[in-house]
Amino acid sequence: MQHKYLLYILPLIIVFLFSSAVAQSPESIATTKVSSLPDEKIIDLWNQAKAQGLTETEVYAVLKQKGMPASEIEELKNRVTLLGLSGTGSATKTSSAPPVNKIDHSRTNTDTVSKPTAKKQEEPKKADNLTIYGYDMFRQSGLSFEPNFSAPTPKNYILGPGDEVIVLVTGLNERDIKSVVTPEGNLQIPNAGIIAVAGFTIEQATSLIKRRLAKVYPAIESGKTSVTISLGNIRRIRVTVTGEVNTPGGYTVSALTPLFNVLYNSGGPNANGSLRQIRLIRNNKLFKTVDLYEFLQQGTMPNNIRLEDQDVINIPVYKKLVGIKGEIKRPAYYELKDNETMADLIAYAGGFTAQAYKGVAKLIQINDLQKDVKDVSANSFGNYVLRNGDMVEINPITDRYTNRIILEGMAYRPGVYELVPGLTLSQLLKNAQGLKPEAYMERGFIKRTMPDLQRTSIPFDPRQILAGKNDIPLMREDSILILSQDVFISNQKIAVNGYVRKPVTITYRSGLKLADVIALAGGFDDEAAAHHVEVSRIINNKSDSVATQLVSTFVVNMEDPSDPNYNVELQPRDVVNVLRLVNNRPLGNVKIRGEVVFPNDYAVQKRDETAQEFLTRAGGITPFGSAENVQIFRSGVRVNVDVLSAKSKNILLPGDSIYVPRVISNVEVAGAVNNPQYILYKGRNFKYYIDAVGGTTQKARLKGAYIKYPNGMNRPVKNVLFFKSYPPVKPGSKIIVPEKSPDARIKVGISDLGGIAAALTALVSIVAILSK
C-alpha cells in the first residue's frame, strides 16, 4: 500500500520541485533549459528529492514522464555528475558537491634549487691586490635572484609534465579543478576528458581548455560563465652549468627559475671565467649570449631569461682583462670586449675622483719580452683600444696651489687667503680684520719659497705695516706669522708642598703672597706646623764663578701676623714647604698575642715604651704562658730579646708584635727518624730523645741536626774534632734531623785516592820527624 501511495504523489513532488526551481508552471517543464539553471538551484533540488527518499533513477523517470526532453535529462545527468551528486544514497541530507573556492592557489617554493656541493670560494685577486669587478656579486648573501612564486603566471610560460594546472570556473557555474600534466603531456579535466597541453603556453592552453569545458558548461559561450587558467605547483627542470665556474654540474630548479639565479647558486665564474660572454645553449644551439655588465652597471636585467629543461649554461674563459688603479672611483680589473676603449674602461670604473689628473693616463703594457710605459692623452681615450693584461694608472694632481697665501698667529681671521694681483701685506692684514691686542708688535715674519726653491725669512715691523709704511708685496705660497706676547713671557711656577690639603704647583703671578698660595692649596692640614712654614728661594746669582750656595730659605710663623715675613710676596720658582707638627700625631700600634690576659693591638704611648710595659698593659702573662720563651717580631723577623732581663730595656717600635707561647712539657722529634713523635720531657740529653723515637733512618744526616727552642732560637749539633757536641734540650723544644742530600755524597775517583794517599804519607813523615 505504501509503494502504491508513493506512485500517486511522486509526480506531484517532482513537478512542484522543478516548478519552484524554474519559477514556472508544471506545464512548462518540457521547455526548461538545464544549462540556464545555476549550480545552487540544482544542488538544492537534488537534496530535497533525496530527503523525500527518491532515488536518482526515479527522479529521471518522473521528469521524462512530465515531458522533459531526453537531451535536457542527459544535460541534467552531466550537471549532477559534475557537481558530485551522482551515486549518493537516499539517506544523504546534505550536498556532497565539492566546496567552491577552497583550492589552495599558492605555489610551493621550498627546495628551490638542488645543486652540487659547493667549494669554498674566495674573491679572486691579482698580485697587486686589485679585485676583479663583478665577482663579489656572487658572494652577497642577500642577492639570490630567486623567482617570485607569488607573481602571476607568465602568459608565455610553456607547460610541461609535472606542472600543476588550476582551472577556475566562475559565474553561472562555479568549480575549481586541479590537475597535473602527465608525463605524456596531458591534463585530465572531469567531464571534459583528456587534453594535450605539453608544449603549449598558458595562453594557448587556456583556449583549449575553454573549448572543451564549453561542452559541459554552455554558459561559457554566452559569457555567463568564465574560465581562468593558472599554475599551481611548478615542475622541476634540469639545467647544466659548465666551463669556468666555481661549482659546475647539474642543477634541479623550478621551471620559473631565471638564468641569474642558477649563476648565483653556482658561485659565478671563477678567476678565469667571463662575465660578459656567458652562453645559454638550448637544444644544442646557442640561444643567447649574456653580458652581466648590463646589470652591474645599469641595474637592468634584459638577459635574465627563464630557463627550460635541459638548458646548458656555459662560461668561457675571458679574452681581455684590463686593470685600472689610482685616482679612480672603483679600482679593479675589468673585462673588456674587443672594440671597447680606455674611455669605456674609465666609465666602467665609475669615472675619475676629484683629485685625479685627467689630462694623461699612465699605461703599463706587456710586450713580448718586458713591459712598456705609455702616456695616453685625454683626447685619445675614446679611440685607444686596450690589450689583455694592460694596467692603467690615473695619477693625482700636484699638491700645490697657484694662488695661496697663509696667515698664521694673532690675527682676528687667520687662515688661507687668495693671492690677487698686487696684494700687499698691509692689505692682507686689513682683510683679516687687523691684529689682536695680544699680538707681538715688535716683529713678524714672512716665510717665503723662492722660484729656485730656496727658503727665505723676511722680518717686518707690524706697527709700520699697519701704518702703511714699508709695505711688502706678497708672493705665491707666502706664509705670514704674527707672534703672541705670551711667547716672550716666562711661564714660571710656585710649588706648595707638605702638610696642606691639596699640594699644588701654581703659575706665578705678580703680587702672590704666602697666605695666597696656602689658600690656593686648600689651607693647612690637621697635622701642619703652621708656625714653621719654610720658603726656599733660588738666589739670583749672575756671576760666572761657581757658587756654593744656590738656594736660601727662611721660616715664617703663619700663626703670628706680626712675623716680618707674614705678608712676604713670593717670587718665581719659590718652593713653600709646610712641615708637620713634631708631637701631634699617633706613633702606631704593637700587636700582643698568645698567653696574656688581654691579647689585643695596643697604641704606642711613648717612644721608649718597653716590652715589659706592653705586657703589663695586656694584663700580664697567664699561668699557662712561658715568660722565658716570649718572642718579639719586627717586620716578620724575630728580635732576640730577653723580657725577663731587668737590665734590657727592650724598647719596641710601632708595628712590632709580641707572642707569648704556652708552656709545653713535651719534646718533638721530627725529620729523618724512624718514629717521629712527641716525647715527655725528662731533662735528658739529645741522644736520649733520638733513641726514644727508634733512632735515625739510613738517610739521616745527624751532624746537620738542630734544636728549635720555644723562644724561637735554634742551636745545631756541632763537631769538635772527632766528637759531636749536642745542644741541651728544654721543654717545648723540637729536634729536627734532616736527610742526606743526594748531591752531597762525596764522589772519589782513582786519581783522587792517589792524591789523598800522598797527602797522608807526607803527614806521617812530618809527624815522624817532629817526634825525634
Image: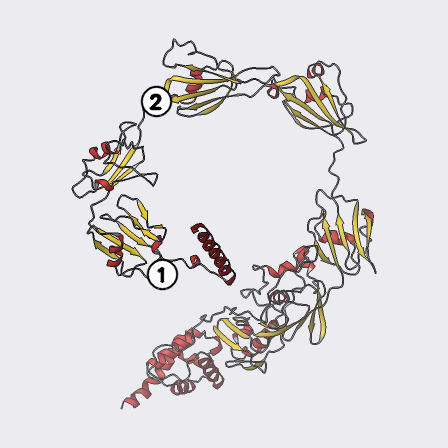
Residue 48 position, x and y percent, is 35, 78
> Which residue corresponds to the image point at 66% horizontal and 22% vertical from the top-left?
482
**Image quadrant where one finds the N terminus:** bottom left
Measure the C-alpha gap from mark 2 to mark 1: 61 Å
- Tell whether 215 sits left or right of 305: left
Q: Residue furthest left?
A: 623
Q: Residues within 10 Å of mark 1 (few under 14, many from 20)?
A: some
Say whether residue 626 is visible: yes
State the SS at label 2.
Answer: loop
Rendered image quadrant of residue 220: bottom right
Rendered image quadrant of residue 556: top left
Color scheme of the displayed model:
secondary structure
- Residue 660's place in the image compared with 154, above or below, is above
> Which residue corresponds to the image point at 57% horizontal and 19% vertical from the top-left?
490
- Residue 364's place in the image compared with 249, above or below, is above
Residue 86 position, x and y percent, is 42, 83
Image depth: mark 2 or mark 1 in front: 1
Residue bearing mark 2: 582
Residue 414 position, x and y percent, is 65, 26
Which amino acid is tagged 2?
Val
Say whether residue 24 is visible: no
State the SS at label 1.
Answer: loop
The numbered mark at residue 699 is: 1
